Image: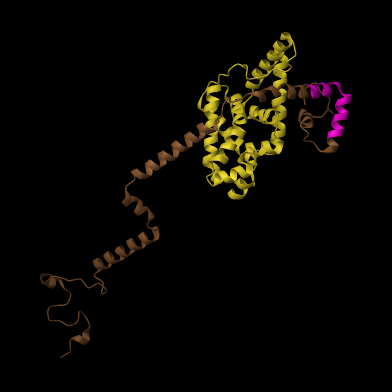
Amino acid sequence: MTSSMQPNCPRTEQLSALIDGELAAGAQEQIKSHAAACPLCGAMLRDLTDLHAALRPFAAARVGFDLAPRVEQRLAAGRRQQQQQRKREPRWWQGWRLLPSGLTAAGMLTVGVYLGALLAGGAGVAAARPAAMAVFDPVPPGGICVGLQSCYPQR
Amino acid sequence: MRRQARGIRMVQELTDRECALLSQQGDHAAYSTLVRRYQDRVYRFILRMVGSRDEALELAQDVLIKAFQALPGWRPEAEFRTWLFRIASNTATDALRRRKVVEFVALDEDYDVPGEGAGPEAQLAAKQQLRALDAALNRLPPDHREILLLREVEDMSYSEIGAALGINEGTVKSRLARAREAVIDHYRRKNA
């Protein structure tokens, strides 16, 4: 609502919606009859209607030629560029990308468990050990057990 | 879909939705139809947003290329026109953001002044009025200018404008009224 409008005047928002046909039927009639009686709202409504008509010539701007071949040309150039980029990529890398990540993770886990078991000297891993390393064994050469007393009969 | 639509009618006779669906399947003729249908609307919207004819032409092509690339994400529930104008609005906003100073070109023969039968004085007056309106329009903030253009030039409803700009109808209504009021005020002051 402009400053010169009366308190019971509709806001410019309502007048603007009226010329766009965006008001409910009831509100439309109410505002129309108010504008017919109120010189300020009537003038505002005329200005809004005039503006609507005055802006119509802006719709006359034209490109002036067919843009479709240009757009198609640019799209085709983009497609060619993408194809060339794909060709430049090494094949092994493309193959690697196709590997399921789960399979890769499982492989890495297996290798990790195997290496861990080797370091811990686990029983499940049968690794060949050189004879020279026998002096470091917890079981003395010729011995049967490491620590069980039953292995060493009491005298 | 493609066989049915293309077999019965020429591609030019298809609706936007049908053309967009065919374009999604890689039908370039269908997309060219959409380009021809919308090139002027996208161009004139961007022209009045950025103010330069060359830039508007370049950006209009960018919009149509972006739209084709984004088509896999378009859903038939969305109206193609409002979806396209959303891309156009974002493109124009980005272009305005990139530069600090906006220089608008003066109106030229692109615009038909009303009344071929009118005398030269009336034509001159009409042209001057249009120039004054153009200057008033260019003074608006971009978010108000685009709403006014979509309503007055593209004849979109409030719900369509809301969908195109990603705002609710209440915001469209209030922003549009403010934009109109500002243009009228500016025009009045210049012609007082």
Q: Is residue B26 left or right of residue A55?
A: left
Viewer-side residue, A14 vs A148: A14
Res. A83 image quadrant: top left
B178 falls in the magenta region: no
Q: Residue at x 65, y 22 (%)?
A: B137
* As drawn, A22 above or below A123: above
Task: Provide residue A106's location: percent of width, then percent of height.
Answer: 36, 63
How many numbered markers are drawn? 0
Q: Colour of chain B?
A: yellow
Q: Which residues are magenta?
A: A28-46
* As drawn, B2 above or below A101: above
Q: Colour of chain A?
A: brown
> In this orientation, does residue B121 appear?
yes
What is the magenta segment's predominant secondary structure?
helix
Task: Provide residue B62's location: percent of width, then percent of height.
Answer: 52, 32
* As drawn, B82 above or below A36: below
Viewer-side residue, A84 vs B151: A84
Farthest residue toward the bottom? A155
